[in-house]
Amino acid sequence: MREVAVVPVKSLTEAKKRLAGALSSEDRQSIVIAMLNDVLHSLNRANLFGQVIVVSPDNTLEYEAEKNHSRFVRQVGDGLNAAVRQVTKMVVEEGASALSCVLGDIPLVEPGDFEELHRISRWKPRVVLSPSLKGGTNVLMRNPPEAIPIAYGRWSYAKHLRAAQEGRVPLYSVSNERLSLDIDTVDDLRILRQRDPMGRTNAGRLVKQLSRLSPLPRSS
């Protein structure tokens, strides 16, 4: 039985609209691709998963998945929950023993972060969460893959906690400044630039380049 990781990504034309006041559509799409490459690179370097999957309604991301030795799955429903449910059903049918859902907008994540989460999630049944700074769930490891129902959206971290409690599934929460930073706003871009001033990540490097061309506006 193998462990699987899935990275759900919106259509590029729909992604990161909260950055529309600061970045052009083309630049927003570039940021999404850069962050996805950072996340996939760390997942593959961690060498924990028998398969890494990118699920998206956007076929143009198939190239990014293949470039990072990952499998692309075309999303058939609408929204993040539909994407994760689709992959959950698929990998259960294929015999996966555990499933980790990793959002594609946490560019600072490192292989060691996944290794730490994985050490905790090895026993069954178990759920390991990594929250965002805004009450979301940036990483959700479920062992087995259907240990709890997924509930992405506003305050998803609290919803996942409640689901584990109601299902009497042991749950652990792990966080650090890399796992908790997801990029949605101009302030998030500014934090990314501060934490990755040398452009070590693809996303950090791109933000640095864009900032040289046009300074990031102040948030209102």
Image: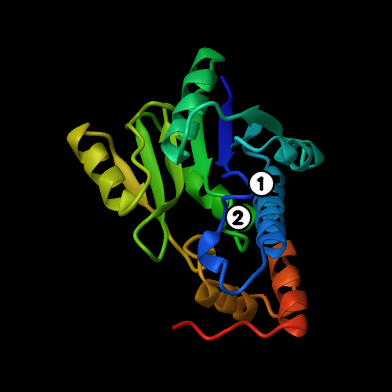
Look at 36% across and 48% down and name the residue there. 153
- Residue situated in front as seen by the camera: 21 or 46: 21
- Are circles 2 and 1 on residues that touch, CB within 8 Å? yes
Look at 71% across and 83% down and name the residue there. 214
Q: Residues within 10 Å of mark 1 (few under 14, many from 20)?
A: some
Residue 22's tag is none
Picture quarter containing residue 113? bottom right
Q: Amino acid at mark 2?
A: Gly
- For the residue labelled by badge 1, is the local secondary structure a helix, a strand or a loop? helix
Look at 60% across and 35% down and name the residue there. 57
- Residue situated in front as seen by the camera: 9 or 168: 9
| Any part of residue 182 in sight | no
- Residue at image mark 2: 112
Image color mode: rainbow
Look at 20% across and 40% down and name the residue there. 165
Q: Residues within 10 Å of mark 2 (few under 14, many from 20)?
A: few
- For the residue labelled by badge 2, is the local secondary structure a helix, a strand or a loop? helix
Q: Is residue 176 left or right of residue 205?
A: left
Quarter of the image where the N terminus is located: top right
Precedes in sequence: disc 2 or disc 1: 1
Q: Residue 29: percent from the left, percent from the top?
A: 68, 56
Q: Residue 55: percent from the left, percent from the top?
A: 60, 34
Q: Is residue 32 left or right of residue 148?
A: right
Q: Is residue 54 shown above or below 180?
A: above
Q: Residue 181: percent from the left, percent from the top?
A: 50, 65
Q: Is residue 117 shown above or below 58?
A: below
Question: Between marks 2 and 1, how big is the CA–CA gap?
Answer: 7 Å
Q: Is residue 175 shown above or below 193?
A: above
Q: Amino acid at mark 1?
A: Ala
